[in-house]
Image (cartoon, rainbow, N blue to C red):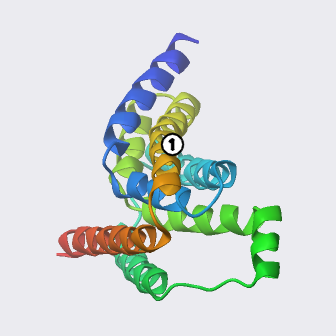
């Protein structure tokens, strides 16, 4: 039990700190201005759980890393596309607005996919792999997942507050810029890793 608690506490602390100011925290803030809080948090939790489970499996079982350079490059290009799409803007009919309010399924999927792509090859994934080579897999997985969700929950709270006080146009431009920054960040990481 002591090994589990050490893995849990160390992983939570390391990943929480690593996530502060990370691109996925900026994504959480962006998504929180567009969707309800619970679906965003569910999407983040599901994606983080899956990525960190793969991370601890790699770190604990194989001790090797994924070819993250190409994955980061593709994800970066996708984020640049998300930024352009956000700038273009979407117009919803009244019926579509009512559906979006009722169903949070699409928000969970959008957030989950975006976070899954962003976290592949990210420093929190690599940190989780490293932690799993030293500590037990279950405590590392649980601690790293909780640490990341807690850090992103802070961003969601900030995003929700901003969403109530900023005009939609400002939010749209801000979201597009954040997606572009995340995309460029991923591309630069990929280029550095591939060289």
Q: Residue at x 37, y 44 (%)?
A: 19
In depth, the one of 6 and 38 nearer the eye is 38
148 or 70, which lies in front?
148
Q: In the rendering, at what x and y percent does residue 120 appear?
A: 44, 62
Q: Position of residue 193 (x, y in %)?
A: 23, 69
Going 40% across and 24% down the picture, which residue do you hit?
Answer: 10
Residue 123 appears left or right of 2: left
Q: Residue at x 46, y 61 (%)?
A: 30
The outermost residue toward the top is 2
Front position in the image: 113 or 138? 113
Q: Would residue 11 be found to the left or right of residue 102 on screen?
A: left
Q: Which residue was labeled with disc 1?
A: 157
Disc 1 on helix, strand or loop? helix
- Name the residue at 78% across, 80% down: 94
In this view, the residue farthest toward the bottom is 88
Q: Position of residue 118 (x, y in %)?
A: 44, 64
Q: How many residues crowd mark 1 within 10 Å: few (<14), some (14–19), many (20+)? A: some
Percent coordinates x, y for residue 18 in the rendering: 32, 41
* Quarter placement of the N terminus: top right
Q: Is residue 143 visible?
A: yes
In the depicted structure, whether residue 105 falls above or below residue 152: below
Q: Say whether residue 98 is left or right of residue 150.
A: right
């Amino acid at each position: 039990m002591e090994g589990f608690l050490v893995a849990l506490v160390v992983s939570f602390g390391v990943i929480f700190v690593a996530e502060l100011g990370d691109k996925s925290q900026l994504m959480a803030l962006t998504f929180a201005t567009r969707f309800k809080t619970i679906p965003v948090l569910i999407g983040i939790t599901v994606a983080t759980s899956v990525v960190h489970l793969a991370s601890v499996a790699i770190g604990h079982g194989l001790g090797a890393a994924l070819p993250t350079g190409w994955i980061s490059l593709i994800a970066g290009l996708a984020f640049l596309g998300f930024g352009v799409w956000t700038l273009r803007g979407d117009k919803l009919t009244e019926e579509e607005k009512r559906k979006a309010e009722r169903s949070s399924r699409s928000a969970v999927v959008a957030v989950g996919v975006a976070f899954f792509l962003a976290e592949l090859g990210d420093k929190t994934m690599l940190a989780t792999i490293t932690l799993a080579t030293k500590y037990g897999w279950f405590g590392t997985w649980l601690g790293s997942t909780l640490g990341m969700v807690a850090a992103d929950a802070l961003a969601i709270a900030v995003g929700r507050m901003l969403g109530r006080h900023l005009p939609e146009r400002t939010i749209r431009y801000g979201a597009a810029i954040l997606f572009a920054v995340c995309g460029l960040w991923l591309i630069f990481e990929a280029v550095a890793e591939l060289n």
